[in-house]
Amino acid sequence: MANDVIEKIISDLEQSELDIMLYFVKKGNKKYVSYSPNVDINVKNVIIKLVTDYLRKKISTSLVKYNPTRCPNIGEVAFCGIDYVGNFNEVLECLSISDNVDTTLEPNEITFYCLVVSDKNEAFNYKFFRRVTKFRKLSKRGLIGTFMGNMFRKIDSEVFGIDGDIDLVADDKQIIIFNNISLERVFKLKEQFRTKATEALDILERTNGIANFEKFRADCLSNARIHRSLCKILGNISDLNKAFENFNNIKTAIDRFGVDVDIDEEKSQLIYTNKSQLKHILDIVNDAYCRSYIREKDIINND
């Protein structure tokens, strides 16, 4: 089954009247800096063909909602709304004030490049992102050269390269993610995960369902993996404020699955004591302890 979204992008790229801009971007601790060189039309056409060829390889994939705790299955491609990454507009602003004069920018300074493609009537506008890690390695190891007559000479300067693969493609609504790690590297997703984790913890604190909550909060915020889990929970559970309302069912799950978490029955609280309990408590919050209908087996659903 064809992916209609990717088919539409391919169809748009096959139009003859395209505006094409190429940006090389450095992601610093405080801001992004971009450089937009003049690019020969023949080079632009080659890049568009490379991108289109790559997309054709993905045309039979299915789109699934982005999950910060796991990669999509084979045959799936993740997506998220542009608001999910938090600083999408910051990246766009960086492109809008790009430098297009001579620059001393070096390949090992660049975090990613971005190809922006639109039509003359602005009916569509796509941003194709690709990290440049592989080109850093290419610059540091091996040899790159060219023929001058019958003489092969080494190119001494470091090179910028474009391989046609795509990590991310964004329009004005969503981002299609071909590489989950690149979503984190291009955008400030670690900061976003921590912000969302803090938001989820604030809600859980108000439920009064976890004893020693300040220690629980501190241990959660010191663990980047837990940030992802809390972010996922916040996105999946609309009534997180009711996480501990059915406390009798929580007790049943703890007993059935042998969960290493003590409870205070009088206060209807889980008693948090150490970091080894973080995942168990978040599985309880996420209602991950289940019993299958068909085989009637106890399972932990971590999807």
Image (cartoon, helix red, strand yellow):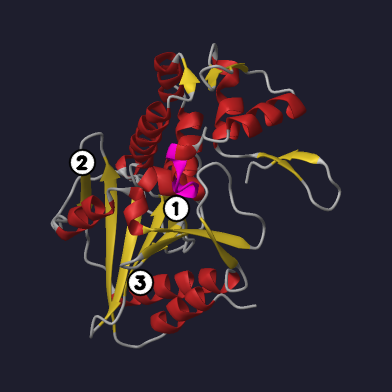
Query: Which kind of residue does numbered mark 2 sit on?
Result: Lys
Note whether residue 253 is visible.
yes
Between the residue at mark 2 and the residue at mark 1, the CA separation in whole angstroms equals: 35 Å
> For this rendering, which residue is in front, 200 or 74?
200
Note whether residue 137 is visible.
no
Q: Is residue 68 above or below residue 15?
A: above
> For this rendering, which residue is in front, 15 or 233?
233
**Residue shown at the point (84%, 45%) measured from the top left:** 296
> Is 236 within the magenta?
yes
Q: Which residues are magenta?
A: 235-241
Q: Mark number for residue 31?
A: 2
Going from N to C along the chain, the mark reached first, 2 or 1, is 2
Residue farthest along the right direction in this orientation: 295
Going from N to C along the chain, the mark reached first, 1 or 3, is 3
Q: Mark number for residue 43?
A: 3
> For this rendering, which residue is in front, 219 or 128?
219
